[in-house]
Image (cartoon, coloured by chain):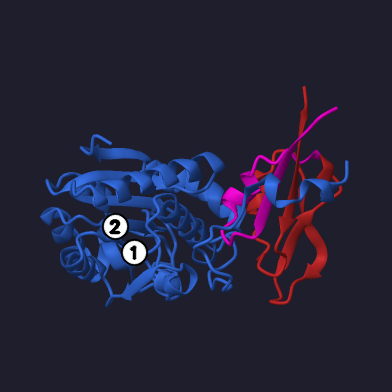
Amino acid sequence: MGKIKGAIVVDTDRCKGCGLCVVACLQDVIVMADKKVNVHGYPYVEPGSNADRCIGCSACGIVCPDGCITVYRKRMED
Amino acid sequence: MNQNNIISPENLVYAKPELMNDTPMHYCAGCSHGVVHKLVAEVVSDMGLEEKTVGVCPVGCAVFAYRYLDVDWQEAAHGRAPAVATAIKRVWPDRLVFTYQGDGDLACIGTAETIHALNRGENITIIFINNAIYGMTGGQMAPTTLLGQKTSTCPYGRDPELHGYPLKMTEIAAQLDGTCYVTRQSVDTVASVRAAKKAIRKAFESSMAGKGSSLVEIVSTCSSGWKLTPVKANEWLREHMLAYYPKGDLKDTTDL
């Protein structure tokens, strides 16, 4: 049976760093970027060291108030 | 497996709704308004009504909603959105007409307009964002502020002897014969966001089917007004707000 893998892309310039996606992510994929801010001066989130654990469930995107997260999902044949 | 192999258009499962444009939203970080804006955009797209939707903006934090969603909008005077929506729907019966109002707009200055529009059974949907505080003007006490909740105008907590009791507009609306669908939802978790989307869809569909007025209350957070982080605000919402404003359908005569 194929394994499902996911990936996320964060629009870091739109992100305000509220952190709701960090809580919503059950795979601990998303982390707050360390001591960095975007063009608007907000802290922001990014896929962390666990990025390969993403299953593409879209939980982060659904709770994101600013629509910053795009989610992709693919069934791997192995 | 390289992440870049997964990131391609055919694998896309979730993105910002097409109707939401790239203008950066002025809302504070973690504000529930953004989630509800997204849900409205998604439902309007799903129903294929992009060219036939007219929203009515309130006065309050959502006053700039017209900047973010690419549907037709009309700005209304403070609290008068249901009256404006009544006129639009009567002139254009084939349009999807909804108002998007906060608790200060709907439950305080616009109580009369809201109750009478709902009681007349106008075929409009009212989306009611209840965050128990005046967010835009600096966190003053609203009619929906919980007992004991501290705001800038009741710094020792809301006292019923002095300030009265929190107003349950949705329960009032459920008593009116003109309403067909009255529900209370929240957008604090993934499951609740999905449920709220279904509720908004049902309300829009019953408006278009001419079944009467719909009221969708969304119990929301105001992390700036509550002086909490967005994550803590969601926890506070679950602990305190949902205890006084329980979620669920209060009235449903739509048969949809």
Amino acid type at image mark 2 = Ile
A59 magenta-colored: yes
Q: In which quadrant of the rendered image does the N terminus of chain B lie? A: top right
Chain A painted colour: red
Amino acid type at image mark 1 = Gln
Q: What element carries label 2?
A: strand
Q: What stretch is highlighted in magenta?
A: A53-78
Going by the image, does B251 lie left or right of B43?
Answer: left
Going by the image, does B214 lie left or right of A77?
Answer: left
At a point 31% along the width and 38% down the height, the residue shown is: B249
Front-most of residues B106 and B12: B12
Please indicate, yes or no, whether residue B181 appears anywhere in the rendered image: yes
Q: Do the residues labelled 2 and 1 touch (CB within 8 Å)?
A: yes
Q: How far is mark 2 from mark 1, CA to CA?
A: 7 Å
Q: Chain letter of disc 1?
A: B
Q: Is mark 1 on a helix, strand or loop?
A: strand
Mark 2 or mark 1, whichever is nearer to me: 2
Residue A24, image x, y percentages:
64, 45
